Amino acid sequence: METNNSSTSILIVDDEPDIREILQFNLRNEGYDIDLAESAEQAAKMLGPEHRLILLDVMMGGISGFKFADRLRKEDNDIPIIFLTAKDTENDMLTGFSIGGDDYISKPFSIKEVVARVRSVLKRTESRNNSAQKNILAVNDLKIDLDTRTVTVDRETVELTKTEFNILVLLVRNTGRIFSRADILDKAWKDDGVVLERTVDVHIARLRKKIGDYGDCIVNRTGYGYTFNLQNKQP
């Protein structure tokens, strides 16, 4: 049994008692502190600053997992969320990530998979928080200095235009979230006048080339928009 996770508190939200008990037993064996909620309504009352992660069932009576997560994000609560769901379709996955979920596990799941995903998300969040303290966004060897507005890949400086920099920051800062072309225009161009949506595609194509292998991480979800997904990076 690991003990180095003892200060890490996880909130499990699921309306199936068996699922809650299985997750609680196994994650406690990994050294995590566990709190349980049987509904989103109960979770909303329990969620506190001590919680580092939410394992959140999607299909529940009352407020669904998606609605609860969306509410948290609109309240600027950026706690990591791993969705648990019996539905395994691309649309559901896209919905979860567009809301701001950090990962998505389909039922039935293996406990080993859950533990691995929990560790991965917590590690990624810790790294992101440590980098944020230095005002740097870091994804492996891709580093974005928000103060100097510079980007490096494998310690080599990459020359980006103002708009390319803004797009990259938007996508990396919100890894997994899908932004429509209209969203990107609004957030990356700001007051630059009237710009056509197809201009977004041109800028992203140039950005992809400039950041090397990390360009593969900028994914176009047909009919939805663009997102940054590290899993798409070629080894």
Image (cartoon, rainbow, N blue to C red):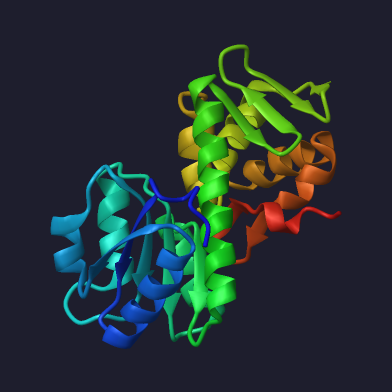
Q: Is residue 2 left or right of residue 73?
A: right
Can residue 194 be seen? Answer: no
Image coordinates of residue 228 in percent, x first then y, are 62, 49
Q: Quadrant of the C terminus?
A: bottom right
Q: Position of residue 173 (x, y in %)?
A: 53, 38
- 216 on left or right of 168: right
Residue nearest the viewer, comparing 2 with 53: 2
Residue 140 pos. (x, y %): 72, 39
Q: With respect to residue 55, does 120 lie above or below? A: above
Q: Quadrant of residue 24?
A: bottom left
Residue 145 position, x and y percent, is: 62, 20
Image position of 115 (left or right of 68): right
Residue at 48% across / 52% down in the picture?
Answer: 3
What residue lies at 35% left-to-right and 68% top-to-bottom? 56
Query: Relative to 183, does residue 121 appear above or below in the rendering?
Result: below
Residue 147 can be seen in this image: yes
Residue depicted at x 42% and y 52%: 80
**Image label count:** 0
Lateral position of residue 232 relative to residue 62, left or right? right
